[in-house]
Image (tube, grey):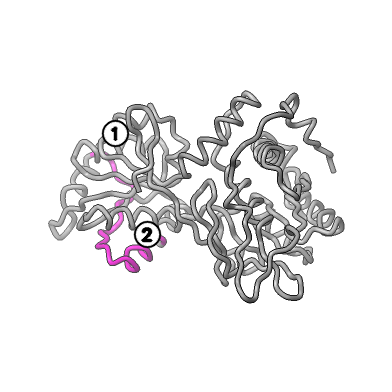
Amino acid sequence: MHTFTRRKLLGCLAATGSLPLLSACVAPSQSRTLIPTEPARTAMLLPLTGPQARLGQSMAKAVWLVEDRSGLRQRVEIFDTGPSPVGAAAAARLADGAGAEVIVGPLFADHTASVMKTKPRAQVISLSNDDRLTETGAWVFGVTPAHSAEAAVAFTKQKGFGSMAMLQPGGAFGVRSAEALARAARAQRVKLMPPIQNANPGDFNRRLNANADGVAADSIYIPAADAEGLKLARMAGSAGKAVIGSLQWADVPPDTLGDIKSMSFTGPDPTLFGRLSSSYQNELGEEMGIISGLAVDAVMLAFGLPRDRRGQVQLAGNAPVEGLLGQCSFRKDRTCMRNLAILQVNNGRIVKVG
């Protein structure tokens, strides 16, 4: 295994100054049965080497930056998974042997499945967005298609739109997005039109204006922020439809979205995320992606977990905490409740509108 220290990854980061970041995230929930005590001994599994090393190192640097500037009592120990599930399992064994009570990560679904086969004593908070990993005993913290769909439907209802359609991307992501949107629409009693699949521009334009029953949708949800999604989002905006994107759109440069009429998308809290992102850019000279914000939220949540009377760390049933990617907490089924913000581009700036 490779050793990566703060000094090595943070380089010449200044030791002065402070960041008023995420103070709400580290405050444990209190009740008659849960008591605050020492933060959970937390380890993190990230790909610090291999093809995804740049992403893993960015996540590590974001976590360490917050730790170094926020005066936390606890520091996370980071273990390198490398590029493979085998490496993830080896890293989990090291973390378990070091006495970790909570393991944050790994990032990928197959890595998480491999980690769970080692039967770690620690609770595992996977950063994957695959809710099926709960069946392995992992807690799933990644931003799932359901999180974006729930926020999009709530925004649609808030704005009083009568019906909603969806441009369904291909593959497993498209299927999961369609299923999540259908569940959210039923729960919030929003009329959902049949999904639009594999649409060429002409067919897409016809479907926007009327479905098979001659009824048009007021809004359209576009999960995939790819070239096709961007092209059809512009078309829908020009047709007067409210366009709502998933979290994928939060990584699209604002100047790319500024000309799309009525475009909204789910994303992180612009104030908290923007504050950390700016500090990250100023100190390290690099852009900080949303996935790095997810890593920060997971570690801060782990540090704030309460314990029961026996001293066991409790993950479910706690009050939500404010994170970079909205309020979050774990349900008893090991899935994560998360309230993403609804964002828009206004004069080149990303602003929160819901």
Residue 240 vs 74, above or below: the answer is above
Residue at left 78%, top 49%? Answer: 87
- Left or right of 318 in this view: 57: right
Residue 22 vs 137, above or below: the answer is above
- Left or right of 265 in this view: 48: right
Residue at left 66%, top 57%? Answer: 304
Please report contact status of discs 2 and 1: CB closer than 8 Å, yes or no.
Answer: no
Secondary structure beneath label 2:
helix
Magenta span covers which residues? 180-201
Q: Is residue 197 magenta?
A: yes
Residue 5 vs 105, above or below: the answer is above
Q: How far from the left and from the top, in percent, is residue 154?
A: 33, 57
Q: How far from the left and from the top, in percent, is residue 256?
A: 37, 28
Q: Is residue 350 magenta?
A: no
Rendering quarter of residue 250: top left
Residue at numbered disc 1: 260
Q: Amino acid at mark 2?
A: Leu
Q: Is residue 51 visible?
A: no
Secondary structure beneath label 1:
loop
Q: How far from the left and from the top, in percent, is residue 354?
A: 35, 49
Q: Nearer the viewer, residue 122 or 300?
A: 300
Q: Nearer the viewer, residue 111 or 149?
A: 149
Q: Is residue 63 visible?
A: yes
Q: Which mark is residue 180?
A: none
Residue at left 42%, top 40%? Answer: 249
Q: Which mark is residue 181?
A: 2
Residue found at the far right of this picture: 97
Q: How far from the left and from the top, in percent, is residue 116?
A: 72, 63
Q: Amino acid at mark 1?
A: Ile
Quarter of the image for the N terminus: give it.
top right
- Left or right of 353 in this view: 303: right
